Image: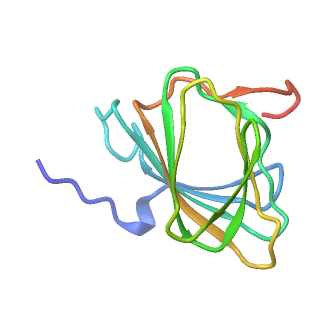
Amino acid sequence: MTRIVRAADQPRHRSTRDSRDRVDLVTEVTMPGVTQLKADLITYHPGDTAARHYHDDADHFFYVLSGSGTLHTDAAHRVQVGDLIRVEAGEVHHFHNDTGADLLFFELWVPAPRDTIWVDADDV
């Protein structure tokens, strides 16, 4: 059965840590019954950085749509438009937008993660 979720009905969130924006695309709310995939659209504004975290039960994929920034895993990786990135389950990671322009990427998890595990307990 076809399901269309209009832009106005897609849940939107602003980070309480910085000014990052997230649009939930594929979640239990937008696509009930879908558990093998989760997807979001993320915007990191200049200077934004996420907290170090991992997902122990899902691989994480990113496709950079615009801008550039740094992905931190066991090393710093410069990412830019058109890059496709895979972070494996259990791998600690976070992004930092160290530029003057927005960094926009599509992210998905396979399967949908049960939890996000924060490396520093104060980062939630």
Q: Nearer the viewer, residue 63 or 16?
A: 63
Quarter of image, res 117 = top right
Residue 19: give x, y in percent of width and height.
78, 62
Task: Quarter of the image for the C terminus: give it.
Answer: top right
Residue 77: give x, y in percent of width and height: 71, 53
Residue at the image point whose x is 42% and y is 60% from the top: 9
* Residue most extreme to the bottom: 100
Residue 75, compared with residue 101, is above or below; it is: above
Q: Is residue 124 above or below residue 56?
A: below
> Residue at image x 11%, y 47%?
1
Seen from the viewer's position, the closer of residues 44 and 12 is 44
Q: Is residue 37 left or right of residue 68?
A: left
Measuring 64% from the left and 29% from the top, which residue is drawn there? Answer: 91
Q: How many marks?
A: 0
> Percent position (x, y) of residue 23?
53, 58
Which residue appears at 25% of the width and 59% of the height? 4
Q: Residue furthest left?
A: 1
Q: Position of residue 87 (x, y in %)?
A: 56, 38
Question: Is residue 73 toward the left or the right of residue 108 in the image?
Answer: right
Residue 42, quarter of picture:
bottom right
How is the structure coloured here? Answer: rainbow
Horizontally, is 32 left or right of 121 in the view? left
